[in-house]
Image (tube, rainbow, N blue to C red):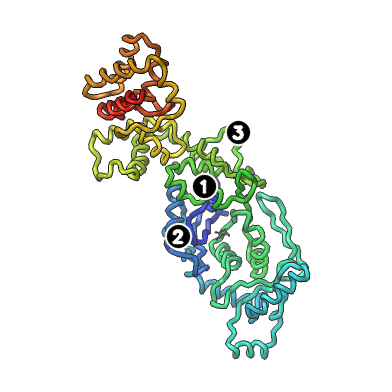
Amino acid sequence: MTVKVRFAPSPTGPLHIGGARSALFNYLYARRNDGVFIVRSEDTDLERSSRESEHNILEALRWLGIHWDEGIEVGGDNGPYRQTERLDLYNKYTEKLLEQGTAYYCYCSEEELEAERQMLIAKGETPRYLGRCRNLAGEERRKFEEDGRKPVVRFRVPEGQRIIIPDLVRGEVVFESDGIGDFVIVKSDGIPVYNYAVVIDDTTMAVTHVIRGEEHLSNTPRQILIYEALGLNKPEFAHISLILNTEGRKMSKRDGDTAVIDYQKKGYLPEAVVNFIVLMGWAPPGEQEIFTIDELCANFSLDRVSKSPAVFDINKLNWINSHYIKQASLERLVELTLPYLQEEGLFKKEQLSEEEYRWISTFVETIAEKLDYLAQAKGYIHYVHGEELPELEEEAKEILKEEQVPALLELFKDKIKSEDTLTVDVAKSILKQVGKELKLSGKQIFMPVRIALTGQVHGPDLYRIITLLGRENALKRLDKTISML
Ligand code: GLU
């Protein structure tokens, strides 16, 4: 039997890290098993769903390198792939359930349901529907209809049943039907609810494995009851653990960025995000932690997915991302970094001159190994661009008091003045000559020159800094430092 898995986001916002992980695990599982990966949309929340969100989610998946074989935009034999376009299909199944008596119309008003809820809470019981409309006589139904009440359709939950979920990650999970209460499957506006529509979708699309977040585990018994009532084959289930923050609480917006697009915007590379996400739940077989998506497709398996919670550790993501930045081609890094420079008002033109391109390449090459993510490039601009000397660090002020500094900076300045262009080689030879003439060691030279040019004690390669600054800016900055001595 062909493995078929799916990702079924609700298009009510951007793709979050948790959703991306579900999508990724399904994708990898499909690839590993020569299966089919479906992407469809659970858009029955009419108020909160939008095509824009759907589009953004699909874009984020593509950015991550997650591609689907069947579903929205790519089509397939089991469409349409948006729930709001499948209402006729759900209606057919609803008719069957109503006919069988495993579902019934319920006319209870909001107020009546709320009163029942409060009553159960007051008694210390789990709020649930107690079944007032379970056995309405035809006469009673007609009366409600005449009163203009619009019914919902409720599923009749069997009493005293143990519902066993054989979960591929968590082992057997058992629920008791008695805690559930007859639940709504179709709302009064004719729109099915998630727990119902998802079953019809999974069954008609011949989904074999449902891999999704642990937050859906409590929905699964309801879905199993629906499969059973309709006499349908159940898929296998695998619920992947929650993602916690480093303090052990459920990851939330307060912990920082939760949407994939946030990471894209900051200049994380997609292969790093994928690599990071997969490690939140999947334990690789050996010591290796860096995996390309192709390696993951070849190695992923559900039996290495942990049932203990995953931890979102931004330091780990940064470590992985900096690894991939170091691996990336300079050309790619330049292209990805340019927008951050533009945000800071640099290189706004459509077409870069050769000289500008060279400058950016040197800039990116110089700082790349210092970056956790590319937006951090912005923080390095003022070291190497423009005539303004950045504010001196405290430690830097102390170093400038060393006795060799005035002569050193004057001589360095004179040497720069007599050069037209400061290439890395020129910068190297100037500093060498300065050392020779003044009989100073490398350490006595490099620190003060770095400080005189950037205000900082540490930073990227000094020769490159000199090149990036260029003659005029370097001279202006030197003058400023000399004037402070
Ligand atoms: N729409 C659900 C979600 O976004 C999908 C749940 C499922 O995969 O069954 O969480």
Q: Which residue is mark 3?
A: 286
Q: Badge 3 local density, few (<14 within 10 Å), some, or many (20+)?
A: few
Q: CA distance from mark 3 to mark 2?
A: 38 Å
The residue furthest front is: 484
In terms of sequence position, does the residue under pointer 3 or pointer 1 come before the other? 1
Q: Quadrant of the N terminus?
A: bottom right
Nearest the viewer among 411 and 217 is 411
Above or below residue 457? Residue 152 is below
Residue ID at (21%, 23%):
420
Residue 101 position, x and y percent, is 67, 78
In the displayed structure image, the side of residue 228 where residue 479 appears, left or right: left
Q: Tell me where residue 98 sits by quadrant.
A: bottom right
Q: Earlier in the sequence, mark 1 or mark 2?
A: 1
Badge 2: residue crowd in 10 Å (few <14, some 14–19, many ≥20) = some
Q: Amino acid at mark 1?
A: Arg
Q: Which residue is mark 2?
A: 53
Counting residues from the N terminus, which is met first, the one under dot 3 or under dot 2?
A: 2
How packed is label 1: few (under 14 Cα within 10 Å), some, or many (20 or more)?
A: some
Q: Position of residue 452 (x, y in %)?
A: 36, 25
Q: Nearer the viewer, mark 1 or mark 2?
A: 2
